[in-house]
Image (spheres, rainbow, N blue to C red):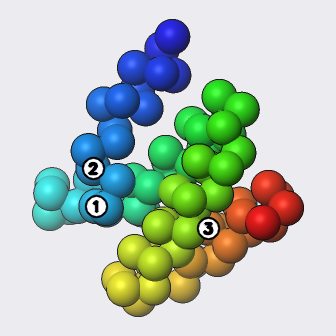
Amino acid sequence: PAMERLYAQLLPAAGELAGAGSGLLTLGPAAHHLGHLSTALGRHHQAAGHYRQARAIADKAQAPHWATAARDALHRLGK
């Protein structure tokens, strides 16, 4: 239940960089964290979509380390 609530709360920020509004730091694409939550909840198809979105956001932000993390996560899912 806690992961479900966290997922629901984070979902509206799926297209954003987590923490970017602070102006100090970012924790990467929120979609990447949603992918982790989806994986933990056993929703692998949903997780793959989040990781693909995270990769696109990382590419747009010119952040190759986040793009690589998203690609690696997709690979672990077999996608």
| Residue at 78%, 66% in the rendered image | 79
Q: Are marks 1 and 3 in contact (CB under 8 Å)?
A: no
Residue at the limit of the structure toward the top, as seen here: 1
Tell me if 29 is positioned left or right of 35 in this view: left
Q: Position of residue 11 (x, y in %)?
A: 34, 42
Residue at the limit of the structure toward the front, as seen here: 45
Q: Position of residue 31 (x, y in %)?
A: 44, 55
- The kind of residue tagged 2 is Ala
| Residue at 71%, 60% in the rendered image | 73
Label 2, label 1: how many angstroms apart (C-alpha)?
5 Å
Q: Are marks 2 and 1 in contact (CB under 8 Å)?
A: yes
Label 2, label 3: how many angstroms apart (C-alpha)?
17 Å
Q: Which residue is mark 2?
A: 13
- The kind of residue tagged 1 is Glu
Q: Which residue is mark 3?
A: 70
Does dot 3 land on a helix, a strand or a loop? helix
